[in-house]
Each structure stands twice: as C-alpha cells, then as structure tokens.
Image: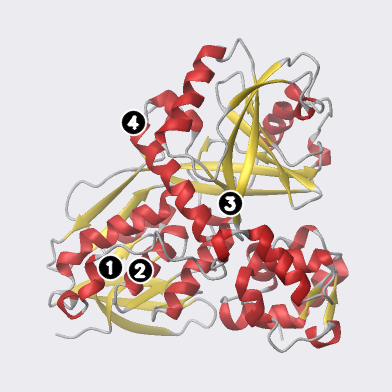
Amino acid sequence: MSTDYDLLIIGGGVNGAGIARDAAGRGMSVLLVEAGDLAGATSSASTKLIHGGLRYLEYYEFRLVREALREREVLLGLAPHIIWPLDFILPHVPGVRPAWMVRIGLYLYDHLGKLKRLKPSKGIDLGLDPSGRPLKDSYKKGFQYSDCWVQDSRLVVLNALDASELGAHILTRTACTGLKAVDGHWQAELRDVNNGETLTRTATMVVNAAGPWVHKVLEGNNLIHQGKTHNIRLVKGSHIIVPRIFEGPQAYILQQPDRRIVFAIPYEYNYTLIGTTEVDYHDDPTAPKIGDAEKEYLCSAVNRYFKTTLAPAGIVHTYSGVRPLLDDGKGAAREVTRDYTLELETHYGAPILSVFGGKITTYRRLAEETIGKLMPYWTRAHENPASQSPWTDTVPLPGGDMLNADFDGFLADQAERYDWLPPDLLLRYARAYGTRMDRMLKAATDMNSLGRHFGDGIYLIEIEYLRKFEWAKTAEDILWRRSKMLLHISDMTRRSVEAYMDQ
C-alpha cells in the first residue's frame, strides 16, 4: 500500500530537525510535525555550547566525549555564522580537583578529538593574564581551553530549512494526537493547535523525537510499545542572564563545591549568561520555571569567583529547559549520561524508532545513525543510489557556505556590499543568516527599502523573511528564538511587533 510519506518525524527540536535534513537529502519523503515552535522547548534552552563535555571525562564517558569533539570540528565548518570558537578559563581550586587531574583531563580533551580550528589547552597565571582581572585575587592559577558557541535555536531552524528545501514538509503548531499501525504502515492523526482542525497522514516509518514527551508518544492512547523500554530522567536546567560582569571575549568554567560546574559566558554583547543548574523534574515539561534556590545557586557560583557581587535582584532574564536524559541509574543528576540510545520497534510490521537522550553537539551523528537504522525498511531505497551514503558532514547548513568557512572574511565582504547598513545591524544579519542575508536583502538598496521600522533595528523585511521562510508565527518566535532581540528592545518596540504579528 502506498503512503503519503516515507518518514514521519514527531518533534521539531534539534534531533528531529537533524533527522529530517538527513532523510530528505537521501531522497526520502518526509513530514515533520511539531506541536509548538521549532526549538520551542529543550533545544532553545541549552547553555548554547558545541562542546565535548570536559566534565564527562570524570565519568569515563570517553566514547561520548570523542564523538562530541569530532562533531565540534565538523559543525564549526558547516555553520560558521552561528557557531564560533570560544576560549574558556578554568580557575584552579585545589580542594575540588587537583591540578594534575585537570591537566590530564585537558590533555585527553585535546587529543581525543583532532584539533583543526581550535587552540590547544594551556596553563595560565591569573595574576598576569588579562582573563584573571575579573576574578578574586585568591585565584592564582588557571587553565585555558577552547570549545564552541552556538546559536542553538537557529541551528534547529537551519536544519529544518535545509530539510524543507530538500523536499521535506515541516508543520509547526501541529500535534500528533494519534498514531496506529494499519496494514504495515503508520496512520497519524494530526491536529492544528491554533484552530483545532485535524487531518490524517500515513507514513511507512516513524521517528519519535519528542524529547521529554518521548514516552507519551509510545504509551499514551497509542499503546505502541510492547515491551520494556528505556527510562528517561527529566532534569531541569536553568540559566540566568545578567548585565555583563566582565570584559573580554573569554568565558569561564566555575567548579563548585558539589563538584558541578557553572559557565559564565559573554552573551549578546551587553550581558553574561550563567548556567546551568541540574534539578530532577517531575512536573509538566511544557513550561518549566527557574526556582528561587536555582537563582541563589547561580548567583553564589558567580560570587565565589568574581569580584563583582551578584544578587537575584540583578537578574535581567531567565530561561529553563527540561532535558530528557537517558536514565542510567546514576544517583545525582550531574552524573546522568548525556549519551543517547535509539530504540527500534517493529512489532506491528511498521518500524518506529524512538530517540532517548542525546545532546545538541551530537545531534548530526544521532541523525545519521537513525537513518542508518531505518534504511533497511525504506521500500524505495533502491530508487535512490545515493541514499546509502552519509552526506551531512560536508554540506554546509543554509547560510554557512562561506569561502573556507571564514566568517570574518565574509563579514568584510558584506560590509563593502551593504555599505549603507549600520555596522551593528550588518553584524546581526551576518551572524543570524550568513550568506542567506543576500536573499533577505535582495531587493534592498538603502535603509528605506528595509520597510517599516518597528524600532531598535527591527525592520519589516526581516519579519517577513522569518514568516515566509523560517516558520515564525508569533512575536516570541521572532524576538526570542529566531533572534535574541527581546534583550535589546524597548517595550514599545516589542508591543509593535506583537501587534503586527497578531493581525
């Protein structure tokens, strides 16, 4: 029996969008459904790092760290506009981890993944190095290493955009409310969450990438799973955003007395991002909120290291996300693995693969492995000779096709091309859209041609681009997930954008 799609993907986070991209590029007909906005949950609530996970070495997660470090180099080449190197300063605290342990960890970190674009680690004298100036004078010795920063929600959107341009159908604000196997294929009931309208679509295969809701897909009214499945441990991670507490482009990794670590990262030019907490979570993952104890914990982490004193009253903004971690039976939330497991069920004669766990850094490898597991069940594979070949490690994401992945060179070229754009707006467009800013600005020749100015550097041309090409449907989609302009604009500008989007 023919179906509407080869593959239905439930979940529009980084894993779902990455799988959609990989599958569409191999010739599969793909439908991705997301009940909210793309990256509307966990994938926009990360610490925004592409990293190997230095602390995971303490738990002997060598394979995971090696894979993540290799992916760090791959992703940096695929999306240099939204991913870039970031130096981290680790002040040494003798009572937490001895210096020899940190040195060994950093040596492994340098050598488990091949360094191509990033600098090797080194020891530093915090009394002499400029990075030591914001720290209390009691911190004398430190270490420096490199990882990468990522605009996490844009990473999701760009994967979905590429999937769409390769033929995938992306439906946001569309919930999968029913799923059943019929005559060897899947029949899905889909509901538009805005107007309540329902439709039915069929698919040969299903990927359950619903993140915190992965069990709900399997065990709700669908009763799909027939045996013991992996457990998911929901862990809430909260971050705070405060006015900038230190100068310089470097970030800090702060060891805590409970052996956790907290990052302090330059954020959106004027701010510092601090996080994350790790708290077991048992409530509805739809709208997690930071608790007072988490705010105190993060402020105390800063006050332990920096000369600046931070109190909860100084917090400008917070965000929280629920991470669906693979439950490996560890006691403390900080010890739970960030690895993933892909569980393939064929009981009904129609394959459904569920994603348990994972982290943003390894999403591409997870997607590649997912498609590899599903390939034997794709009935049209013989029609697509290239379908067996992995491809996402060499093809840039939309906007990332810059010469030699050189963002600085690209920015200089764009400054000449759009010499009428203010430098701050030019930089924001280049970072957000990369080479795709040319598509957005193709009809623009001066500031007047950007259309209505809503205030604070937000113009109609960008809003309409996001609505047309990036599934933006609300002001929050535009001001928080497609950008972080919510941190930079006045209430009047925000209300103007809200009014326009609500028309």
**Disc on res. 9:** 2
Q: Secondary structure at mark 4?
A: loop
Q: Residue at x 81, y 32 (%)?
A: 310
Q: Residue at x 38, y 28 (%)?
A: 330
Give the distance between the C-alpha atoms of the residues marked 3 and 1, in whole angstroms: 26 Å
Q: Secondary structure at mark 1?
A: strand
Q: Are marks 3 and 2 in contact (CB under 8 Å)?
A: no
Q: Earlier in the sequence, mark 4 or mark 2?
A: 2
Q: Residue at x 17, y 55 (%)?
A: 226
Q: Residues within 10 Å of mark 3 (few under 14, many from 20)?
A: many
Instruction: Look at mark 4 in the image and give the residue it sits on.
Output: 329
Residue 467 image position (x, y, % from top left): 62, 80
Q: Nearer the viewer, residue 85 or 404?
A: 404
Q: Earlier in the sequence, mark 3 or mark 2?
A: 2
Give the distance between the C-alpha atoms of the residues marked 1 and 4, in whole angstroms: 28 Å
Q: Nearer the viewer, residue 318 or 78?
A: 78
Query: Which amino acid lies under the numbered mark 3 shown in the image of this protein?
Result: Ala
Q: Is residue 246 above or below residue 417?
A: above
Q: Residues within 10 Å of mark 2 (few under 14, many from 20)?
A: many
**Image quadrant containing the C terminus:** bottom right
Instruction: Look at mark 3 in the image and give the residue it sits on.
Output: 45
Give the distance between the C-alpha atoms of the residues marked 3 and 2, in whole angstroms: 21 Å
**Image quadrant containing the N terminus:** bottom left
Instruction: Look at mark 1 in the image and give the residue it sits on.
Output: 206
Give the distance between the C-alpha atoms of the residues marked 1 and 2, in whole angstroms: 6 Å
Q: Earlier in the sequence, mark 3 or mark 4?
A: 3
Q: Residues within 10 Å of mark 4 (few under 14, many from 20)?
A: few
Q: Earlier in the sequence, mark 1 or mark 2?
A: 2
Is 345 left or right of 326, judged from the image as shown?
A: left
Q: Are marks 1 and 4 in contact (CB under 8 Å)?
A: no
